[in-house]
Amino acid sequence: MENNVKDLKQVAHFSEDAANINSMFKSDQLQMDVLLLNTHQYISPVVEPISDIIYFVLRGEGVFEVGDEVLVLTRNTSVLVEMGVSSGIINESDEQLTVLKIAAPPGIHNLSS
């Protein structure tokens, strides 16, 4: 088995134009992306019909729309979004937001195609 090691600093970069979605790993069972949002950037709500998703905040603070709920998550906090529930992210803070997204199984709305 081949080691699949990736360094976040080498793979993921912020964009001034829009939120940046960086694919880290993908297999038949799961997908892991790193989402990078500068201040006032957003990722519109999407429904993953076949995937459960975990969002884990690595850095910053973000507003997460999960179904009908609005949650503010900060560093080292996470939320589980079950399949069929919409989710989106807004960075309303003055700092950059870095979020780890894990989808299992990989969704059909892969943000990082």
Image (cartoon, rainbow, N blue to C red):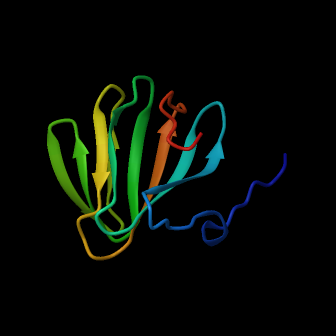
Where does residue 97 sit, x and y in percent of width and height? Answer: 37, 67
Query: How many numbered marks, from 0 up?
Result: 0
Q: Residue furthest bottom?
A: 94
Q: Residue at x 60, y 66 (%)?
A: 8
Where does residue 43 sit, x and y in percent of width and height? Answer: 35, 49
Which quadrant of the view contains residue 59? bottom left
The one nearer the camera, 84 or 92, is: 92
Q: Residue at x 16, y 49 (%)?
A: 70
Which quadrant of the view contains residue 12? bottom right
Quarter holding the C terminus is top right
Q: Residue furthest right?
A: 1
Where does residue 88 sit, x and y in percent of width and height? Answer: 30, 45
Residue 66 in the image: above or below residue 35: above
Q: Residue furthest front?
A: 17
Query: On the rendered structure, is 111 left or right of 44?
Result: right
Which quadrant of the view contains residue 46? top left
Quarter holding the N terminus is top right
Residue 10 in the image: above or below residue 46: below
The one nearer the camera, 41 or 25, is: 41
Residue 104 in the image: above or below residue 91: above
The one nearer the camera, 2 or 19, is: 19
Residue 102 in the image: above or below residue 14: above
Q: Residue at x 32, y 25 (%)?
A: 84
Q: Residue at x 40, y 23 (%)?
A: 49
Query: On the rendered structure, is 83 left or right of 103?
Result: left
